[in-house]
Amino acid sequence: MELVYVYPAERGRGVEAEIVGILRDRFGTVVQTGREERDAERGDRMDVLVTLEVSNDKVEAALTALRAHPLVIDAAARSFGERV
């Protein structure tokens, strides 16, 4: 299943490698399938929206881990819809 998360672009791409590494260590196969920079909802900055593929039985645990990461602004299953 696809998960998406957002982090501040100014933190750099190392955030993505760190997150994928953490999730792989805990949940096995995790694949980053997308990355998009977007204007932030607030302020004059950019956020990065990242899409990951994880196994269906690990979705809730992976979402909890993403939301607990200090640089992750938000995380959701499938998409944020029009909100982000």
Image (tube, helix red, strand yellow):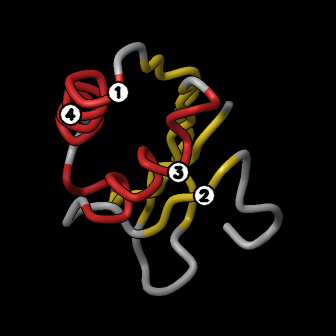
30 displayed left or right of 4: left
Q: How crowded is mark 3: few (under 14 residues within 10 Å), some or many (20 or more)?
A: few
Q: Quick one: SS at disc 4? A: helix
Give how far apart the Cα atoms at labels 3 and 4 are: 15 Å
Q: Position of residue 71 (x, y in %)?
A: 24, 62
Which residue was labeled with disc 3? 60
Q: Are marks 1 and 4 in contact (CB under 8 Å)?
A: no
What is the three-letter code of the residue carrying label 1? Phe
Amino acid at circle 2 = Ala
**Dot 1 or dot 2, earlier in sequence:** 1
> Which residue is disc 2 drawn over?
76
In which quarter of the view is residue 78 placed?
A: top right
Marks 1 and 2, Cα distance to the nearest angstrom? 17 Å
Which residue is label 4 attached to?
22
Residue highlighted by disc 1 = 27
The x, y position of residue 82, in whole percent, is: 82, 67
Q: In the rendered structure, find residue 39 and report the number of the disc placed on it.
A: none
Q: How far apart are marks 1 and 4 (CA)?
A: 9 Å
Q: Which of marks 3 and 1 is nearer the N terminus?
A: 1
The amino acid type, in three-letter code, at marker 4 is Ile
Q: Residue at x 58, y 32 (%)?
A: 57
Q: Where is residue 67 in the image (x, y as percent from the top left)?
A: 37, 63
Q: In terms of depth relative to the viewer, which is nearer, 14 or 32? A: 32
Residue visible at 57% across and 23% down in the picture: 55
